Amino acid sequence: MSSNKISEYLTYREVVKKLLLLTGVWPVEKPSVIYRSLPYIQIVVGFSMAYVIFGFVRAHSDNINLMTRGLSIITAFLTIVLKMTCLIIYRREIYDLHELLDVYFKNLLQDLNVIKTVLSNVTTFRRLTIVFIILVVYSCGCWVFLPLYHNYQQYSRHIQPTKYALIYPTNYPWNIPTSGYIFHLHFIFETIASTILCLITTSVDSLFAFYAFQIIGQLREISHYISLVDENNNDKSIIRKCVIQYQNLMKCRDMIEKMYGPMILWIMITNAVILCTVMFQITHMKSISKGRIGLLFTWISLKTLQTFIYSWSGSQLTVESENYSTAVYCSKWYGNKSFMSSVIIMLTQRPLVLTACNFSVVSLDMFVTILNTTMSYFFLLQALETEV
């Protein structure tokens, strides 16, 4: 059983690592200039796409249906710009987290006493991550495939005049022909942008859940060892290890809040907007293809799952931190004055709670709030459309 869990964890880690290597975020020794430039290139591409899609939104500001369609895509590209900007600013913190969490966890896998407890919920984290990656890849693939298929149909049937479609609703500052090499270059650019959107979304969001899992694993380790302390076995090294390790985990929590706080706050706002705009599009489509239906419902599922992963990971971290405090309190500390003082100190430590820029606690309550906000925005759009 333990070997299966270890194998599952290593597979989970390898998936996250490969995604981060493709985006230029995973810590490597002596990174090349190209590797260090990848985040900056992705920011430029993401911002460029947001700009040209905003042109489409501005040109159709009198049509709520078309405007909401563009807004849902703009927020997706602005999200990846924000994510990569935060990771560039806090690149040093990523290396520190790698040392405190990933390197330590690699050694932790050798401890047969706790490995089963530490990896007990790796299956849930891994499956949520895999399902999320599949939804992102499918969504981005549909964005590219649907107009590509439409263009191929025109080409194969020799429809004249030919009017090929780009991937996204855009309004470039220059005129783009409906066919030819210039059109193909723009289509390739938007395909690259879709690939970047897919890689950044999957890698950065998966990394958050991966960090949460590693912190939870270390909390379970120290909970196990603190429960072994009693009147006869009051090894001070165990107590010292638990106190120092919990302090390190508090540092990890603070670094994650720095990096992911703005991202989570942004996701709280934009996911509610995206979900309501996509729902609004569905209710206003008189005729829709099966591919388009699949794309929109996958988009809804993707954004809902993305919100859930952040919220659930934060809740799991808080619950495990509280379990550690319970393990400290339930340890057999009575009868030993030196241990009693250590227990009092450990019990005064606050639970590990993640917040989004000190604005909201990252928990399942946040997930429920976002869904309620989505419905409020949706009814507001319907009211606005009725007035217009």
Image (tube, rainbow, N blue to C red):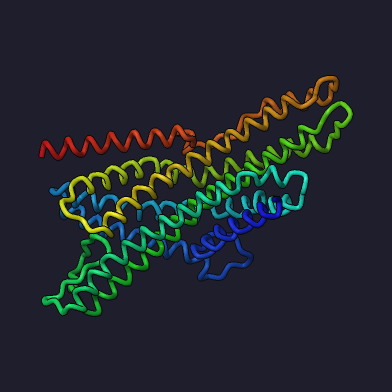
For the question of whether residue 84 can be seen, the reply is no
Q: Position of residue 264 (x, y in %)?
A: 44, 43
Q: Position of residue 296 (x, y in %)?
A: 30, 52
Q: Position of residue 206 (x, y in %)?
A: 51, 52
Location of residue 157 (image quadrant): bottom left
Residue 335 shown left or right of residue 242 in the figure: right
Q: Residue at x 31, y 44 (%)?
A: 275
Up-down: is 387 above or below 339?
below
Residue 368 shown left or right of residue 159 in the figure: right
Q: Residue at x 60, y 59 (%)?
A: 11
Q: Position of residue 265 (x, y in %)?
A: 42, 41
Up-down: is 331 above or below 310?
above
Residue 34 shown left or right of residue 43 in the figure: right
Location of residue 320 (image quadrant): top right
Q: In terms of depth relative to the viewer, which is nearer, 332 or 182?
A: 332
Up-down: is 228 above or below 128?
above
Q: In terms of depth relative to the viewer, which is nearer, 382 or 347?
A: 382
Instruction: Indicate the quadrant containing the C terminus: top left, top right, bottom left or bottom right.
Output: top left
For the question of whether residue 3 can be seen, the reply is yes
Location of residue 73 (image quadrant): bottom left
Q: In terms of depth relative to the viewer, which is nearer, 47 or 5?
A: 5
Residue extending furthest top? Answer: 335
Q: Residue at x 17, y 35 (%)?
A: 383
How many labels were placed on the picture? Answer: 0
Q: Residue at x 85, y 20 (%)?
A: 335
Q: In terms of depth relative to the viewer, which is nearer, 159 or 20?
A: 159
